[in-house]
Image: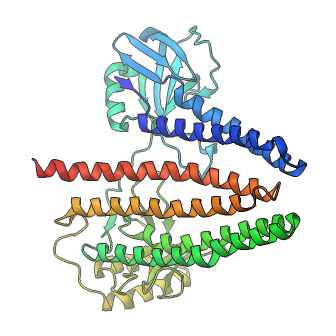
Amino acid sequence: MKVRQPYFDRLVLLLFGMLLLTGAVGIAYAMLDVAWVGLFLGAAAVAFGLATGGRLVRDAVLPFRVDVDTAGWSVRTPKLHRQLRWDEVAAVVLADPPATAGRHLLRGPRLLLVPAAGVSLGVPLPEKSPVDGRPAIELFELAEVAYDEDQLARDLAVLAGERFHRLSRQPVPPADGISLRRFPDQPERARLNRWLDRRRAVLFVGWYLVVLVPSLVLVVVATQRNELLGAIVLVVSVVVVGVVTTAARRLTESCRDLIDTEAIIDGADLVIGSAPASPRISLLSGSVTVLRPGELKGFGDAWLLAHSADEEPLVPLLLLGDPRTGRLRDRDDLRALEAVLRRSVDERDRAAGRQLDELAARAPASPAMPLAGVRPDRAHATFLWQAAKGVGRAVVLLGVVVTVVIAGGWVVEEAAFVGPALIVTAVGMLGVWIVYAVHRVLVFGAALLTIVARAFR
């Protein structure tokens, strides 16, 4: 059994780290003849680039090897460098991270190693085994390595025997749950995705021409008149561009996130997704409502099932209709949701149930055979087209980076603060773009190789 980190992940870390280090050195060289304000900003950028870039490069080049066989363990990671026989290992635990790790950061299972009594690993043991509370060390998180969780569990069960404990939660759907159909079905799903792509393209062009370019022009003009005025305009422009970008992304991506969503009615709960940490919303808590088309921006002509607790904003849970055409979800799905909501003691839930009952009367009957798993005849060609669109988006986004570089270069010699700030921003954007572009090119290459392999099969 050999556990390694994905080479692609290490390459991305190395490239991004080297980019930050190079940018830090370049800024340090440019700081030799700037005013004190630019000197302060440049020093901060250099410190950030050296610290972050150095950390990324270190993580990329440090060895990561975990070999396990019948003789024992050979561990060579940043946390532990040690050879261990099996009699020096008390337990091996595959467990979920502690609840205190943060609710907004979804972390995968991690592998803990518990040494036998009297065995020193030569490093601190900051963790505790969830089995018996004994000191342990975390070797890695499963998301960090190129190893499937089920395969890892099977291999460790064979090699470690009774020492191995699997405590990670598994995405097992409830036995008595009602699975809702994925919506919309093909080919409507493909048409809906194309509709969303066109809308995203229009929003991007509008954002670029109406928000980004005018903001940069204002920054350049203000800086040429007065650097302090230019700095103020720059700060305001960053806030405006950030707010507008967030709003535009919400309009384009919120609807896409609900397409083809897996959902299960488990008793009185609606479970969204199949992962262990999938959201679970009670349908009898007085927090569920049905939204008419147009009540929530970005969802076209779709009816929506939404959730809101107390004064919090509405969160869309499930598409009840097609945003492009307004066609309703299958009748059986709407009836299943209505059957739960009508049992609630809260009037809000019962009102949502009555609305679903009205929609079900107009909804199409469910097909005789479930279409959830049906794939289009040209699935591989569709995947190749989606990958090609990803490469095209990367090319278009490069224009944004170039625009910021041009704006920074226009005033870099006239302003000690605004010019370097724009250049540093462009360098950071370029680093993110490189990671995104490499990912998209690799996805396109994999899709193309799949098509070629099928052609010669």
Image coordinates for residue 437, horizontal then vertical, percent: 45, 52
Q: Quadrant of the N terminus?
A: top left
Residue at position x 53%, y 53% in the image: 433
In the depicted structure, whether residue 279 falls above or below residue 115: below
Residue nearest the observer in this picture, 326 or 15: 15
332 over 66 or under it: above or below: below
> How many circles with numbers are drawn on the protein?
0
* Residue furthest left as drawn: 457
Residue 58 position within the rendered picture, expressed as x and y whole percent measured from the top left: 59, 28
The one nearer the camera, 334 or 18, is: 18
Residue 238: % across, % down: 72, 66
Residue 100, image quadrant: top right
Residue at screen point 35% across, 37% down: 148
Q: Relative to 316, say whether 386 is above or below.
A: above
Q: Residue at x 40, y 82 (%)?
A: 323
The structure residue drawn at horizontal position 53% and vertical position 39%, both measured from the top left corner, is 15
Q: Is residue 6 visible?
A: no
